[in-house]
Image (spheres, rainbow, N blue to C red):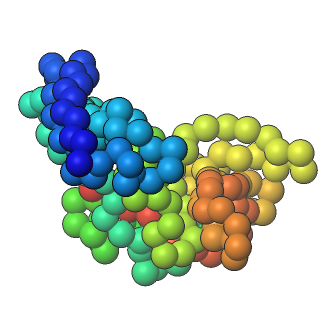
Amino acid sequence: PIEEEASYHISTITGSAQARVTPSLPRALSPPNMHTPTLVAFAALLVALSVCVPALARPQGAAPRSSPFRGITKGQYNGSMVAWFHDYNGYDDAQYACEREFSASHVCTAFELSLMAQYEGLNQGGDYRYVDLSFAVNAKGQEINDCFGFTSDDSKYLSRCVRHVIGGPVVPRACECDMVMPFICCDNQ
């Protein structure tokens, strides 16, 4: 049998990785169109990736990443949180809805949902509202404004939400404020 020994050096972010491969099959027994240098290069690439990928996952010394997600309220609410908690600030009432079910939590923000989308996805088991703190007007003339600061259950106002469409993607949408749904809650970090 013909044996060849090859060494390949691949420079990586963390330094250099070296692959040393000694093929065990003679060239005559190798699969068609697969030459020893190709196999050696592939093996060297695998070794380099085993060195590079962990280095790219997280900078050295950085804390492991985690999702801020705590849970989805069992309570179902329309957009008028002041009707439930009887004051004039709908945002703190929405926060209280999370706090009473998940201690040390608040209603997740659009930023926190973007983190969740990257870590584990937005499919958390149902439809839910979140805080967006933005203003827009859709084509129907409805205002997207967190249900007027979570003080209104009028369908002319909308809030940001995530709705699950069977067979479709799980993405943020705008939901009318007369719709009843839970809030998604995140950890107070």
Compared with 188, 102 (above or below) is below
Left or right: 115 as drawn, with respect to 80: left
On screen, residue 15 versus residue 175, left or right, reads left
Q: Position of residue 186 (x, y in %)?
A: 34, 57
Residue 89 in view, yes or no = no
Considering only vertical position in the picture, is 94 above or below 125? above
Q: Nearer the viewer, residue 85 or 125?
A: 125
Most extreme residue toward the bottom is: 74
Q: Is residue 28 left or right of residue 174?
A: left
Q: Is residue 82 left or right of residue 167?
A: left
118 and 7: which one is in front? 7
Residue 122 is situated, as x and y percent measured from the top left of the image, at 50, 60
* Residue plotted at (46% across, 58% down): 121
- For the point 55% across and 61% down, the residue is 129
Give percent across and percent down for residue 50: 22, 41
Q: Position of residue 153 (x, y in %)?
A: 68, 65
Above or below, comparing residue 117 to residue 71 in the picture = above
Say which quarter of the image contains residue 45: top left
As rendered, which of 71 and 5 lies closer to the eye?
Answer: 5
For this orientation, the residue located farthest to the right is: 140
Residue drawn at 45 percent across, 44 percent down: 34
